[in-house]
Amino acid sequence: MFYLNEFFKSLGESLIRGFSFFFFSCLFAFSLTHRPWIASMVDKISPEKIVNPYFVAVMDDKVDAVKLKSLIARLPGVLGIEDKSSAESRGKINQLVKQLGADYQVSTELMNFKSVRIALNPSLSQDSLNFVREQVVKFGGRDHMTATDVKYPEVTGVMKAHPFYSFMAKAGDWGIIGVFGMAWIISFWLCYDVFRSRAYIIEKFQRKKLVASKTIASGLSIVVVVFCALGLLDGTLKFFDTILLLMVFSVFWTFSMQEWRWKPTL
């Protein structure tokens, strides 16, 4: 109990450095003991999961558009159904026909069509998105209706080009854990002198040995035990992740076992 009390007293010697060290110790321990949760959060903030995917269904005049919309609205994952402008679509077809030449003719049946834009829930998997699309085509009849592939708004491409999302896509959950780990290492070295100075005084006047190492070990042990227990309760604790957490903490903890000399805190 003495060393645990000493751990928190050492953190209080420099509130900013002490709080940073304790905060990033907890954050790093949480990220490794709850790595599946971190992975799920990384997936949820991906551009594809933030914006609503959609596809456009095109039908001829033999399809009952009102009945079709009613059926589509009942499908799981459908967020909205929006009528596309037929006049705009016809204008694009007429422009294409002009480019093909005067000899190219388009039948009136082809020009008499309707289209709807169907927005889907981004939480759906790719298979589920394609399933909804197939069901819409099936409702309308494959001879009278077609649909584009599932697409994402143009903002998705812009978001993917951002360095943050580019890093997340490449590094995933281990990238987040790596950032937390680096932040913990920096906070450890910033708080290093605080433990060293207090340990020197205690060792000189109370005849105790390895005070700094025992102090740091007691504090980090509490952090590991608490977050491992939470990870076990949440079902996110993995053996490999726990070993990695212990290894990182242990490697830097061994530096505290060296011979201490007086160095005043800043």
Image: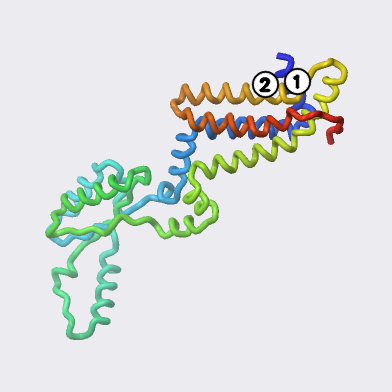
Q: What distance separates the C-alpha of mark 2 from that of mark 1?
A: 9 Å
Residue found 19% across the figure and 64% down from its top: 113
- What label sits on residue 218 in the rendered view? 2
Number of residues whose C-alpha sits closer than 10 Å to that of mark 1, classed few (under 14), some (14–19) or many (20 or more): many
Of residue 214 and residue 185, the one placed in the foreground of this image is: 214
Q: What is the three-letter code of the residue carrying label 2?
A: Ser
Which dot, 2 or 1, sits closer to the camera?
2
| Image position, residue 200 (x, y; %) | 83, 25
Determine whether, in the image, residue 71 is placed left or right of residue 162: left
Residue assigned mark 1: 6
Q: What is the three-letter code of the residue carrying label 1?
A: Glu
Is residue 227 positioned above or below 208 on the image? below
| Image position, residue 23 (x, y; %) | 65, 32
Residue found 33% across the figure and 51% down from its top: 119
Of residue 116 and residue 40, the one placed in the foreground of this image is: 40
| Image position, residue 152 (x, y; %) | 37, 55
The quadrant in which residue 97 appears is: bottom left
The quadrant in which residue 249 appears is: top right
Counting residues from the N terminus, which is met first, the one under dot 2 or under dot 1? 1
Label 2: which secondary element: helix
Residue 23 seen from this side:
yes
Label 1: which secondary element: helix
Is residue 168 positioned above or below 41 on the image? below
| Image position, residue 88 (x, y; %) | 30, 68
Residue that lies at the very extreme toward the top in this rendered image: 1
Residue that lies at the very extreme toward the front in this rendered image: 259
